[in-house]
């Protein structure tokens, strides 16, 4: 029987991951830009930590750790990614994108979902940064994969704020969106593509489909965003009993709603492992 993970274990593991990725503690006064790229040894250590958090046999095992990480470190990660990109620190850039690609998807990870629409994400221009680094070529290592990075890019298109892109049609600038399509086609025509796991191939194909729709289907991202919002549980109904009236948001995280104290008490055991006051502003 596996030992039950406690909230303090979860937070400790999230802090450790952030430290290994070179992300300053968000509670310290200033995030100083990293003066040097990650070394090969630092990258190896970070990759083994990621493999321990997201084991191949049970990929969901680390969800609570990565959700805690999302609540606390996404702003620092976005700033560090910007700095690594400006300084051409390729190893750091790759490592940070590997982490992003492993975050539980926005539909189940409220902090990831909210961060994609936060002013901080807009300022760092995170979606365009990640997509252009992917086009230019980054070092993607297990447990991540090109399919996972494509999934991250798809999420940032589907959940992101379209007004931050240069043509206001998507969160990623138009020239970078146009450069993605041939990159995906090249991946799909590589030897061995057919042997990749189905999920991996699906991640690449899904991004190609979304890019097509953005260019050819008016209002596609707005309607897909509405649809996805409707699928998030605990937003338009009580998280526990599914009732729709007199809902109150959890006062700490504001990511889930309840019809009253009884349901909140009932849901707390499960919710507490995902309840954090986030390190960034959101509505
Ligand atoms: Zn209820
Ligand atoms: Zn909460």
Image (cartoon, rainbow, N blue to C red):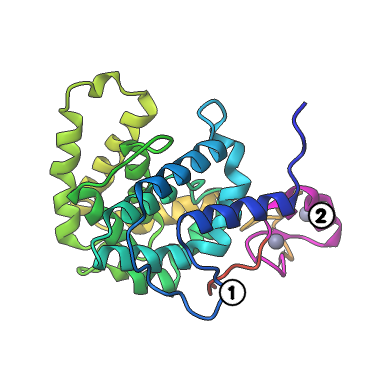
> How far across and how far down the image is residue 214, in percent?
24, 53
**Side of 74 where 179 appears, left or right:** left
Q: Secondary structure at mark 1?
A: loop
- Specify the quadrant of the image occupied by residue 283: bottom right
Residue 169, horizontal then vertical, whole percent: 25, 63
Image point (44%, 49%), residue name: 99
Left or right: 248 as drawn, with respect to 33: right
Q: Secondary structure at mark 2?
A: helix
Residue 165 to residue 154: above or below: below
Compare residues 181 and 88 and report the one nearer the observer: 88
- Circle 2 Cα neighbour tier, 10 Å, few/some/many (<14 / 14–19 / ≥20): some
* Residue holding disc 1: 27
Is residue 26 on the magenta stretch? no
Residue indicated by mark 2: 263
User: Which residue is situated farthest in the bottom direction here?
Assistant: 29
Q: Quadrant of the N terminus?
A: top right
Query: For the residue with label 2, is its CB less than 8 Å from the closest atom of ligand 1?
Result: yes
For label 1, the crowd category at 10 Å Cα-Cα, with few meaning under 14, some 14 to 19 and many 20 or more, is: few
Residue placed most toward the observer, 195 or 223:
195
The stretch drawn in magenta includes residue 256: yes
**Nearer the camera: disc 2 or disc 1:** 1
Query: Which segment is the magenta one?
Result: 249-275
């Amino acid at each position: 029987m596996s030992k039950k993970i406690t909230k303090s274990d979860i937070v400790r593991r999230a802090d450790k991951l952030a430290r290994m990725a070179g992300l300053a503690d968000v509670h310290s006064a200033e995030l100083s830009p990293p003066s040097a790229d990650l070394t090969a040894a630092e990258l190896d250590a970070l990759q083994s930590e990621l493999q321990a958090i997201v084991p191949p046999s049970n990929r969901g095992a680390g969800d609570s750790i990565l959700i805690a990480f999302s609540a606390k470190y996404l702003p620092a990660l976005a700033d560090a990614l910007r700095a690594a990109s400006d300084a051409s620190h390729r190893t750091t850039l790759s490592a940070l994108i590997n982490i992003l690609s492993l975050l539980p998807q926005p539909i189940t990870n409220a902090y990831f979902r909210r961060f994609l629409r936060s002013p901080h994400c807009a300022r760092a221009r995170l979606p365009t940064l990640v997509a252009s680094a992917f086009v230019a070529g980054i070092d993607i290592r297990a447990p991540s994969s090109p399919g996972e990075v494509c999934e991250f890019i798809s999420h940032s298109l589907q959940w992101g704020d379209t007004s931050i892109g240069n043509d206001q049609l998507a969160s990623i600038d138009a020239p970078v969106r146009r450069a993605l399509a041939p990159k995906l086609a090249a991946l799909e025509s590589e030897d061995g593509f057919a042997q990749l796991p189905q999920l991996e191939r699906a991640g690449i194909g899904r991004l190609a489909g979304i890019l097509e729709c953005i260019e050819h289907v008016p209002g596609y991202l707005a309607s897909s965003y509405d649809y996805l919002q409707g699928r998030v549980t605990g937003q338009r109904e009580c998280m526990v009993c599914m009732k729709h009236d007199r809902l109150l948001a959890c006062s700490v995280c504001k990511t889930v709603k309840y019809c009253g104290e009884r349901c909140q008490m009932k849901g707390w055991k499960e919710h507490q492992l995902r309840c954090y006051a986030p390190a960034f502003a959101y509505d």
